[in-house]
Image (cartoon, grey):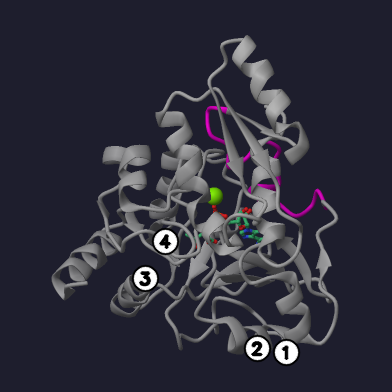
Amino acid sequence: MPDAEIQAAVARLRAGELVGIPTETVYGLGADAENDDAVARIFAVKRRPRNHPLIVHLALGASLDGWVSEATPDARVLAKAFWPGPLTMILPRGPRSHLEVTGGQNTVAVRVPAHPVAQQLLRAFGGGIAAPSANRFGSVSPTTAQHVRDDLGHDVACVLDGGPCGVGIESTIVDLSRGRPILLRPGSVSREQLSAVLGREVEVNSNDAAVRVSGQLESHYAPRARVEIVERESVAARERAARDHNERITVLDASGINESIDDIARNLYENLRQADLDGIERVLVILPTDEGLGLAVRDRLMRAAGPR
Ligand code: TXA
Ligand code: MG
């Protein structure tokens, strides 16, 4: 991306404004992580509860000193294996990670994104950029610059267009602050990969109410259309029933049988958004198995199908 565009975005960040940022997972709504007013603006624009913590994004090679109080041995191993990339680690908070960013918690989420534009911006900015996904709270994350403009309009000072996101779903989150590694949100760095690199099984979050992960709320990542999980065998019957009720439906085959699971993840949110644009009332979804990236795709679709 031309340096002039990056410098303009840096100026916005320094002025406490919000910038739409491409990452390899989804687009983020970025602010200077150490500017409490700018961070407060993120919560206001997203209409997100103040106690739902944000991820601090750092440049490749930037020191974690100050951001975390302790980079554990597991954190070093995972950083070496997966950064820059779609992995977020929860670690004990350092003084640069203000309570405004961490939602009042004594841990902080940190990630070094791989997208070249995100890296260019982070290097030019120098500090940490706090960024949630650039959508209103509870809805589908944006995977193009246009999605960000559609969702947030004039509430965002500028959007850097880095093209469509390659991964398409939010980063894997692993909690390293509790002695043993716990997977809080599945993503494209799979549970199997984490376990292999750490040399021990990574537990899947047991829905601990003390840990606030907004993705843990029911009915998250949801389009306007109802999302219904169906078995392949019952699709035809469900389609007939819907037609009898004059309901506008579509089928989303996320099983991975007809398409690679990477493509399914990459296009998932675009497909859900398109269903809304097409006036679809109900999306019938066939889930993949929970292996590899399938676990993350299942997670997002089951939340989209959750009670409203
Ligand atoms: O791929 C991603 O992670 C994208 C891009 C922009 O980096 N960001 C993203 O942010 O998905 P957001 O805010 O939509 O989701 C971050 C999740 C939230 O569910 C939040 O609760 C959790 O990370 N989180 C942040 N800090 C945490 C902490 N200290 N403990 C537990 N969960 C935390
Ligand atoms: Mg989000």
Specify which label sits upstream in the sequence, 3 or 2: 2
Q: CA distance from mark 1 to mark 4?
A: 31 Å
Tell me which amino acid carries mark 4. Answer: Cys
Most common SS among magenta residues: loop
Find disc 4 in the rendering and name its residue: 165
The crowd level at tag 1 (other Cα within 10 Å; few <14, some 14-19, many 20+) is: few
Q: Residue at x 62, y 45 (%)?
A: 253
Q: Please identify the residue farthest to the top as the structure is shown.
A: 245
Q: Which mark is residue 76?
A: 2
Q: Residue at x 65, y 54 (%)?
A: 297
Q: Which residues are magenta?
A: 208-225
Q: Is residue 249 left or right of residue 76?
A: left
Q: CA distance from mark 2 to mark 1?
A: 5 Å
Find disc 1 in the rendering and name its residue: 73
Q: CA distance from mark 3 to mark 2?
A: 22 Å
Residue 53, horizontal then vertical, whole percent = 59, 55
Assess whether residue 211 is covered by the magenta stretch. yes
> Which quadrant would residue 95 be assigned to in this image?
bottom right
Assess whether residue 293 is covered by the magenta stretch. no
Find disc 3 in the rendering and name its residue: 118
Q: Which mark is residue 265?
A: none
Specify which label sits upstream in the sequence, 1 or 4: 1
The crowd level at tag 3 (other Cα within 10 Å; few <14, some 14-19, many 20+) is: many
Tell me which amino acid carries mark 3. Answer: Ala
- Asked which secondary structure carries label 2, the reply is helix
- Asked which secondary structure carries label 3, the reply is helix
Tell me which amino acid carries mark 2. Answer: Arg
